[in-house]
Image (cartoon, helix red, strand yellow):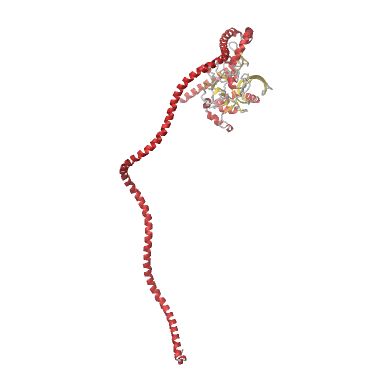
């Protein structure tokens, strides 16, 4: 039973998926919807996955930054039409046509607009590029971010003129943004980088597929970064490879933003993303991302559609109408805060007002007929008249004020000088008195405090010394007697023990040395005497015997000789009897 239940459930899911695919195919056939994802929008993996999977040559940086071009004078955006002969594969060639718009100083000339104006993404409408661009005064405009085909809501990150409209929650799709310092940003951003407040984004919009990175085609790397499910890969590759109308945004080496739009119809005419990347690279673009394309691709000049859409109009399907889309890239006149750019630019409002006044005064009817639409003529006249009246009143007041000031200044200068001197003297006296009183009080307090401190210190030192000596003598004697007795006993015991040990060692050493010397001397003497006596006796006995023998012999010989001589002298006969 469990197996059959699972099989039925799987059959239902597959049937629903097949029906959804058929519905998408039918929708594509009728309205030319070009989708990168089958379900939802964007990959499910984290920014860390994108960072770890990119080439090591990029390090940990997953986006590229480029300084925006800036100008001291009013720069002008330029839009050009191209008609190019593209290689046609089996065919000999095919022609494509579209627009490239170069926008200098994008920080002050380019905005991301919500559909229909501020609050559009919250209300979830889809509005044509024309309807969004006209009230905003866009010189050039093209569709930008993707939208939810079910709810019509804006997708991805959206920052419009410094307002965070929508946060994608870190979904990793290709991004284009302009930071507050004018830096252009292209690539993959973490949620922390999107929400960074140190140099926040003034404009930000999400696309799908990073086309060029540092002037090299980056589509294969984008396939890995922006598609994480096997079931999506075939659809995602078809989204990249198919010929269709396309919209993109990038920048050149000078820091100018480049807006790209090419007309087409899915599977029939237009460009693949490979061809878009190659075309942009050949035309000097450094970094670029792909925006919503297919039937959504729209380009508007001064409020008028300039492209060739593919969606059939309602109710008459013989004609083609621009699709209602999500966000819009709008190129407008230079914006500054304050209006005159702190003296470095042009106050467009004042210039326009002066131009309108001169035009209306010379020939209001003829100018309005040529420049304004027929249905707005009457409304514009009444609005302009009311605005001009209020503007002229305010301008006249300001002009009169400036004129009166210059006249009054010249007259008042001479009178005021004499009056001011006398008035200032009296005022200054009273003011100075009050100011000096308060200042002197605070100064005196601080001075007195410092002086008193130094005086008191010197006096107290001398007085305290004498008083302390007498008081301390009496107090210390009584306190020391009691305290010292108990402390000294314990301290003396320990100190005496250590001192006695060291002293005794040194004294004993010296005493022992002297005593030992005297004792040794007496002992040695007695021992030597006793030993000598015994040794001498034995030695003397043997030595004396030998010596005595020799001495006796010599003495006897000498004595005998002398005796014999004397005897011989006395008795001559003894001479013959001698031996």
Q: Can residue 322 be seen in this view?
A: no
Foreground residue among 444 and 383:
444
At a point 37% along the width and 63% down the height, the residue shown is 518
- Residue occupying the point 41% across, 34% down: 455
Depth check: give the residue in front, 552 or 337. Answer: 552
Asked whether, in this view, residue 7 is left or right of residue 101, the answer is left
Residue at figure coordinates x 59%, y 33% from the top left: 57
Q: Quadrant of residue 339?
A: top right
Q: Which of 447 and 6 is in front in this view?
A: 447
**Depicted 209 relative to depicted 124: above or below:** below
In the image, what residue occupies the spot 37% across and 56% down?
507
Residue situated furthest bottom in the rendering: 573
| Screen quadrant of the N terminus | top left
Q: Where is residue 142 in the image (x, y as percent from the top left)?
A: 60, 18
Does 507 appear above or below 364? Answer: below
Q: In this view, does 106 lie above or below 469?
A: above
Task: Report if residue 454 is visible in the image.
Answer: yes
Say whether residue 26 is left or right of residue 448: right
Q: Is residue 460 depicted above or below 211 in this figure?
A: below
> Picture quarter containing residue 349?
top right
- 574 or 475: nearer the viewer: 475
Percent coordinates x, y for residue 9 in the rendering = 49, 23
Q: Where is residue 63 in the image (x, y as percent from the top left)?
A: 57, 28
């Amino acid at each position: 039973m469990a197996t059959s239940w699972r099989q039925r459930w799987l059959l239902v899911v597959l049937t629903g998926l097949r029906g959804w695919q058929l519905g998408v195919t039918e929708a594509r056939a009728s309205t030319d919807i070009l989708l990168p994802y089958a379900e939802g929008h964007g990959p499910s993996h984290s920014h860390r996955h994108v960072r770890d999977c990119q080439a090591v040559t990029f390090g940990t940086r997953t986006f590229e930054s480029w300084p925006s071009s800036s100008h001291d004078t009013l720069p002008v955006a330029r839009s050009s039409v191209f008609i190019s002969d593209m290689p046609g594969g089996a065919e000999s060639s095919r022609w494509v046509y579209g627009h490239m718009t170069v926008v200098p100083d994008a920080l002050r000339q380019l905005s991301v607009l919500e559909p229909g104006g501020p609050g559009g993404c919250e209300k979830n409408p889809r509005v044509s590029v024309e309807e969004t661009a006209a009230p905003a005064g866009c010189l050039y405009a093209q569709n930008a971010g993707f939208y939810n085909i079910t709810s019509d809501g804006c997708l991805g990150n959206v920052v419009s003129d410094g307002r965070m409209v929508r946060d994608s929650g870190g979904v990793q799709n290709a991004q284009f943004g302009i930071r507050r310092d004018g830096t252009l940003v292209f690539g993959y951003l973490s949620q922390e980088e999107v929400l960074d407040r140190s140099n926040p984004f003034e404009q930000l919009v999400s696309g799908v597929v990073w086309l060029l990175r540092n002037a090299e085609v980056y589509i294969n790397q984008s396939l890995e970064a922006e598609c994480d499910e096997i079931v999506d890969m075939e659809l995602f590759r078809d989204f990249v490879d198919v010929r269709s109308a396309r919209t993109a945004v990038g920048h050149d080496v000078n820091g100018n933003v480049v807006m790209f739009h090419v007309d087409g119809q899915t599977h029939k005419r237009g460009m693949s993303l490979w061809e878009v990347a190659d075309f942009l690279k050949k035309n000097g673009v450094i970094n670029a991302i792909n925006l919503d394309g297919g039937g959504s691709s729209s380009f508007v000049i001064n409020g008028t559609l300039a492209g060739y859409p593919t969606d059939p109009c309602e109710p008459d399907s013989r004609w083609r109408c621009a699709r209602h889309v999500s966000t819009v890239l709008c190129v407008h006149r230079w914006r500054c805060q304050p209006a005159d750019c702190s003296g470095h630019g042009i106050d467009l409002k004042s210039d326009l007002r002066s131009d309108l006044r001169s035009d209306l005064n010379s020939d209001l009817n003829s100018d309005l007929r040529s420049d304004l639409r027929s249905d707005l003529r009457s409304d514009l006249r009444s609005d302009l008249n009311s605005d001009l009246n209020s503007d002229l009143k305010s301008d006249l007041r300001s002009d009169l004020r400036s004129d009166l000031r210059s006249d009054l200044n010249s007259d008042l200068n001479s009178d005021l000088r004499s009056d001011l001197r006398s008035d200032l003297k009296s005022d200054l006296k009273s003011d100075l008195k009050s100011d000096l009183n308060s200042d002197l009080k605070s100064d005196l307090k601080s001075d007195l405090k410092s002086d008193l401190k130094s005086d008191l210190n010197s006096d107290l030192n001398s007085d305290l010394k004498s008083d302390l000596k007498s008081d301390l003598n009496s107090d210390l004697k009584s306190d020391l007697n009691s305290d010292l007795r108990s402390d000294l006993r314990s301290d003396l015991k320990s100190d005496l023990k250590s001192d006695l040990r060291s002293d005794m060692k040194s004294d004993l050493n010296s005493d022992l040395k002297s005593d030992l010397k005297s004792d040794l001397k007496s002992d040695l003497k007695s021992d030597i005497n006793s030993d000598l006596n015994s040794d001498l006796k034995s030695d003397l006995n043997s030595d004396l015997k030998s010596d005595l023998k020799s001495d006796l012999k010599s003495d006897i010989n000498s004595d005998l000789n002398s005796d014999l001589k004397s005897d011989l002298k006395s008795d001559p006969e003894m001479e013959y009897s001698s031996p």
